[in-house]
Amino acid sequence: MTENYTALYEEHKKLGASFTDFGGWQMPLKYSSELAEHHAVRQSAGLFDLSHMGEVWVTGPGAAAFLDYALVGKISAMSVGKAKYSLICQEDGGIIDDLITYRRGEEKFLVVPNAGNAVVVAAALAERAAGFDVVVEDASATTSLIAVQGPKAEEILLRLVPAEQHTLVTELKYYAAVEVPFTFGGSTEELLLARTGYTGEDGFEVFVANDSAAALWQAIAAVAEEGELIPAGLACRDSLRLEAGMPLYGNELSREGNPYAAGLGPVVSLAKESDFVGRAALEALKAEGAGSTSGRKLVGLKGLGRRAGRGHYPVLKDGIVVGEVTSGQPSPTLGYPVALAYVDVEHAELGTALDIDLRGKAEPFEVIALPFYKRTK
Amino acid sequence: MAKVAPELQYSDEHEWVAREAGNLVSIGISAVATDALGDIVYVDLPEVGSTVTAGETCGEVESTKSVSDLYSPVTGEVTEINDAVVADPALINNDPYGAGWLFKVAADSDGPLLSAEEYASKNGGEL
């Protein structure tokens, strides 16, 4: 597999990052301590390179109808300026990816898939576009994505925005996006700014052309005051999203799973009139009670001891395997181990005592409500 | 680059051994290991009075990202464990060759050990 490098790779090297392969990309795992980076995002702000994520533009008179067909949500119902979390499924209901769609105009949408799925999603969209009056354009290779996440994110980004434009940012709602002029590197550029994130904190994601990415990254770091913001890697991104109870494709979501088992039933619009890929299979799954009365269901587990469950560890009830951990680690914010796991629906009730098989030792856990962590507003 | 303390000996599994009085040795894990593990959040050490065997697992080190076995670099009886690192595992990251030591053994024999130079050149460490 060819390694891909983001436009910010040299910045990460300068900052002394340790790198990891993620979805075919060499990405910063951490710069110093992943715990320090995690706490910085919860308490102040972290700066992330998310340029490995995909960016696929869907434009044309048939764009809204096409996305209603290609994705499981009712995309045509979105108003311009909003963002929506959705899934792209196979005919059998298996999940190809989870993604965010931004409506940028009546006939213009930006779809953001995960790094490892960007090529597959762009191909699936192009294939499903047959018969619709749309153009599908994969801009992933030329677009960078920089996130500033944490309670100080807004304050820091405003320092790069002309004062008369501040309300564009301050009035931007969660899951919405707007073009904002940013002054950096000696000039001003209109950039797409989204109030979205994967950390459970307030925060923003900024789409920027590769050529300008390093200058924007440096400018954000430069306007932050001492101790206000630190670069943050994928290790803390994973612990932050886990605390926020957000699924990660490849861990909680897969082609073998389905939206109902993953607790994403509300994302699937069976009410929309038009057909969509996976509809028949998803209707059948819902009718048979997938994720509620049949099969397994994604739950949150809280460790009662100090040891953490890890991906693929078995979940036990009275010594019998009733599930499997998909993600788990000690929660830096909460101070106890947390895990996401698929368990048989009969053992998925809140308060159920279960064990995780920690390499031969049964460690006690309890089913608790998700998210594990919710910020106070 | 991870620091390798020049006065210590090392095992292939990244434990270090420091000679104390007589056959007493103290044992910890190297900065190469702590860098690779990330922030350590839990450590499971052998019990005082138990016997550890060179090359065999005698505990676990858990970081935010993973769990790794702890291998004893020597054979002998455990005489003391570092309660401070059990209470605050971050000591291992902050000072792997000092306050982050793990346990002491009255060693009857050593497993295969490397000099600091050998260990550093093999693992990309810095003396």
Image: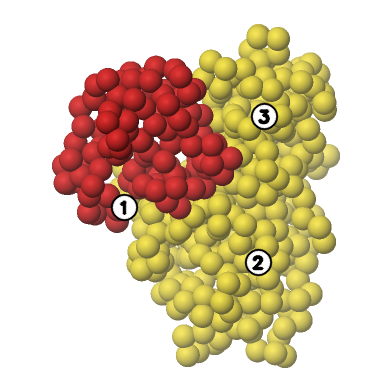
Chain colours: A yellow, B red
Three-letter amino acid code of the residue under disc 3: Gly
Instruction: Let me know if residue A337 appears in the view.
Output: yes
The part of the image, by quadrant, that contains residue A69 is: top right
Three-letter amino acid code of the residue under disc 2: Ser
Q: Which residue is mark 3?
A: A305
Instruction: Say left or right for A193 vs B101.
Output: right
The part of the image, by quadrant, that contains residue A192 is: bottom right
Quick check: A23 above or below A40?
Answer: above
Residue A72 at x, y percent in the picture = 70, 41
Q: CA distance from mark 1 to mark 3?
A: 32 Å
Q: Earlier in the sequence, mark 3 or mark 2?
A: 2
Same-subunit check for callouts 1 and 2: no
SS at mark 2 in the image: loop
User: Of the residues tagged 1 and 2, which is closer to the observer?
Assistant: 1
Instruction: Say left or right for A341 vs A33.
Output: right
User: Of the residues tagged 3 and 2, which is closer to the observer?
Assistant: 3
Residue at 30% across, 53% down: B3
Q: Which residue is mark 2?
A: A44
**CA neighbours of label 3 inside 10 A, class few (<14), some (14 to 19), many (20+):** few
Q: Chain of mark 2?
A: A
SS at mark 3 in the image: loop
Quick check: A249 above or below A56?
Answer: above
Quick check: A230 above or below A121?
Answer: below
Same-subunit check for callouts 1 and 3: no
Q: CA distance from mark 3 to mark 2?
A: 29 Å
Residue A141 at x, y percent in the picture = 42, 60
